Amino acid sequence: MADDRLHLDGSHSVLTPEYVEFDFVLAGMLSRFLAWLVDTIVTVLLSIAVVLLPFFSLYAGLALFVIAGAVFLTRKFGRQEDTSNLTVPMAAMAAGIVLGLGGLAMNVISPSIGFALVFILYFLVDWGYAIFLEGIWSGQTIGKKLFGLRVIQESGVRVTWVQAFLRNFARPVDRLPGFYLVGGLAALFTGSQQRLGDLLAGTVVVRERRLKIPASLSRPEGDTALLADPDFRARVAKVSAEEETVLFNASLRREELGMEARLHLFSTLSQRLQDDLGFFKPQHLSDEKLVLLVTAALAARRAEKAKQGSKRKAPPSPALRPG
């Protein structure tokens, strides 16, 4: 069984208070290893850049200042006198000055400052890389994005900053004695393939999956005036990927629920939409109808993104040549 987990993805089930079960596909050990390999390459490159920072920051700052200064002068005093956007070159010039002065301080005035800074930055890169990205990307790093993986809470919702910190705080222990042997063994023999950091933070690593959205969700019946409201559409854009998945699942499985569980589930989701995202629910609109309208808007947004993606991937049509 442990050997199967190296290649096969398991499942993690979440039972809501309304007795609605949501299933998440667990990330297999192989896909997690590949994602970790990508993240390791990224952190090694960042660490090399940090180590070389004291030696090249003076010259990099000078080069940045010269290039940004040339762009600034061209826009300011060029023939067309394009002064519409001088903010970027001015900011780059300021960054060049700061970088150059930092390099001067580290190399000439006090080299010990440079070594101390390198140590601090290396620590931040090595330990803070995963914490920072999992915090701002809702449980993903560069490696996890490439392989479609995500860290979520055991309850199925988005990971918090505290949980991102806790699961990575235990990473040095998971690494022991090398190549994540302790963490790998823990993942092999726990029900939801959790390493020690996941057990500490109450998180699991799952595989993102694309739900097949039926056309009926994209075209809800009844009053659909809210779909054209600019404020409504702006708030739909703020719905996270995890919230989107919950809304789709609830809308797709609503016919399977008993009446009491159905009313309670959509009342809870509607209240979350109003309290957390500021959606306005007219008095004539039921809780379920509000959720279905939000789901319809999300389905339309997903279809539009897929359409734009297919246009970018489509090869250009051959040019017609005159006969």
Image (tube, helix red, strand yellow):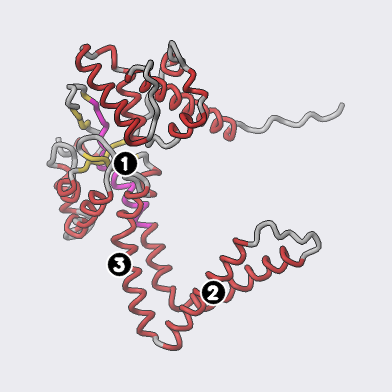
Residue 69 part of the magenta-drawn span: no
Image quadrant assignment for residue 30: top left
Disc 2 to disc 1, C-alpha distance: 37 Å
Does 195 sit above or below residue 100?
Answer: above
Where in the figure is residue 240, as x and y percent of width and height? Answer: 37, 37
Quadrant where the C terminus sits is: top right
Report if residue 106 is visible in the image: yes
Q: Which residue is mark 3?
A: 123
x 30%, y 54%: residue = 131
Disc 3 to disc 1, C-alpha distance: 24 Å
User: Which of pointers 3 and 1 lies earlier in the amino acid sequence?
Assistant: 3
Where in the figure is residue 84, as x and y percent of width and height? Answer: 69, 56
Q: Residues within 10 Å of mark 2 (few under 14, many from 20)?
A: many
> Mark 3: which amino acid?
Phe
The range drawn in magenta is 22-41
x 33%, y 36%: residue = 276
- On residue 61, which mark appears? 2
- On residue 262, which mark appears? none
Q: Residues within 10 Å of mark 3 (few under 14, many from 20)?
A: few
Residue 38 part of the magenta-drawn span: yes
- Front residue of 270/217: it is 270
Where in the figure is residue 105, as x and y percent of width and height? Answer: 44, 83
- Front residue of 117/209: it is 117
Where in the figure is residue 137, as x and y percent of width and height? Answer: 37, 46
The answer to whether the residues at label 2 and label 3 have Cβ atoms under 8 Å apart is: no
